[in-house]
Amino acid sequence: MSLHSVNPTKTESWIALEKHFQEIKEQQMQDVFEKDANRAIRFKIEWQDFYIDYSKNRITDETLSLLLKLAEELKLKEAIGKQFSGKKINQTEDRAVLHTALRDFEHMKPEVKDTLQKMQHFSGEVISGAHKGFTGKAITDLVNIGIGGSHLGPEMVAEALLFYKNHLKTHFIANIDGDGVAEKLKNLNPETTLFIIVSKSFTTQETIANASFIKDWFLEKGSDEDIQKHFVAVSANVEGAKDFGISEENIFPMQDWVGGRFSLWSSVGLSICCAIGFKNFEAMLKGAFEMDNHFKNENFDENIPVKLALISIWYNNFFQAESESVVAYSQYLNKLVPYLQQAVMESNGKSVDRNGERINYQTGTIVWGNVGSNSQHAFFQHLHQGTKLIPTDFIGFSESLHGNVKNDNILMANFFAQTEALWEGTYNKNVENPFKYFDGNKPTNTILIKRLTPKNLGSLIAMYEHKLFVQGIIWNIFSYDQWGVELGKTVAEETLSAIDNKKPAKIGNPSTANLLRFFLKNQQ
Ligand code: F6P
């Protein structure tokens, strides 16, 4: 049963939204806010440890009610049901999309349970030191070799949950850049390092090349038999991993219904599990599971991912905002943006709809950002006084983990102050100097969470996963394929052959051929 497919711009609610947009596009919404004493109370959602304030947006009750009608008209509820029940909603790859099944503690599939048990056992052995390297020493360093979804999620979580981390040092090798790999290996001891090769396909050029290079590096000290103590694989391609030389018991399987960019909950999370222990990993899955239930069961009006998705569509498709930014006021979350960039932009950067027709409206948002308060001293000028509209998510936590309350109060004062300054500006104030005038009216969502715990992090990530799903449904696109990255891979193979054979003339494009000539002449 396929997903409903309708051009959203032809729906009654979209047409009504266009009309409504004309009415409010110039409005200084601070005025509306001021007249409505209850706005801050009505335009917020409290859920578990989360407080989501979306009152500082260029929306009214009518905007929200039209956006909710749009979701209804485009059969969002039905689509959510299809996703969670395992229908093959990734139609272009003929696959179900079931990363939610990896954290479904009510109906856990036996294969998911088995893999979790295997991860629990293995990570326990590595952490306790029972797993020994080839000279009998315990493991001290873990290296995750993988790229894209096989890297960004694990690295982001390992960094975000640093507070909960054990003694193992965690490293990530993703880029094929040989210098980068050499820099990482420089400080590693093959006797005490465990390499986790993560690749769903086990064919990704960068990962296989890096893993092969590292295997050779390892074999300068260890023997072929020692490989089993130092290399494990995470893959849906068990045969590929075996061919590489990994024994079957060292392969952690994953299913084809887990998309790469949604896979941190699966065996792809093995490095997370080793770094923070299984209990914390499980708590993160539980947090995601609770967000799944909220998303599945809550009325759209009180539904966090649905609300955030619809508000983002309002800016993207009506205000024609080109991007949105995410600023987390926590150093721990400094890898959140690269993670979201893959999740959101690989999913929704599409220009053909579910009928195979070219699209004549904007889809996927461009996501960018960094951590606060650093960002205030970098790109915030543009948010405050630039000509572009950049809706921003502010993420912050009430409790500090290390108890440095003095610093954290300053951090959070900035967090609250920025959304207020962006919203209020100096509008209605008597500012004569035009350079010091701020329009305000700059939209933000505030996502305030009690404490950065594994569970809350799980909920936060799942929130963004569901947000992008909702947007894909509304835009009538397939969010779970990524054909766009394939062409580049093919061209790179042809280019590599031209480089290896020193034959730039084999490349048809004159610009590339000339660049290759220059490159080859100056190599080494
Ligand atoms: O090239 C894009 C992509 O297919 C991503 O979707 C994926 O996360 C990444 O490559 C890595 O793929 P694999 O896990 O198969 O190595």
Image (cartoon, helix red, strand yellow):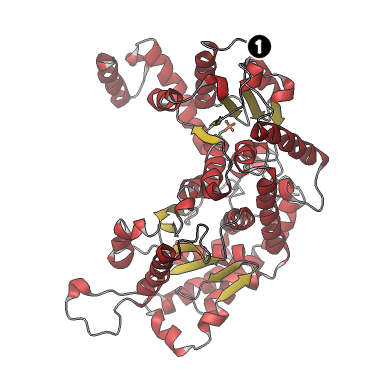
The crowding category of the residue bearing disc 1, from other C-alpha atoms within 10 Å (few below 14, some 14 to 19, many at least 20), is few
User: In this image, 93 relative to 412: left or right?
Assistant: right
Quarter occupied by residue 182: top left
Q: Where residue 95 sits: x, y (%)?
A: 70, 40
Quarter occupied by residue 27: bottom left
Q: Is residue 269 visible?
A: yes
User: Which of 421 and 65 lies nearest the eye of the viewer?
Assistant: 421
User: In this image, 494 relative to 304: left or right?
Assistant: left
Quarter occupied by residue 43: bottom right
Q: Is residue 116 above or below residue 42?
A: above
Q: Where residue 222 sits: x, y (%)?
A: 57, 12
Q: Is residue 441 visible?
A: no
Q: Residue at x 25, y 14 (%)?
A: 521
Q: Where residue 115 sits: x, y (%)?
A: 75, 36
Q: Residue at x 63, y 14 (%)?
A: 226
What residue is shown with label 1?
225
Q: Residue at x 74, y 57 (%)?
A: 81
User: Which of 317 and 447 lies nearest the eye of the viewer?
Assistant: 447
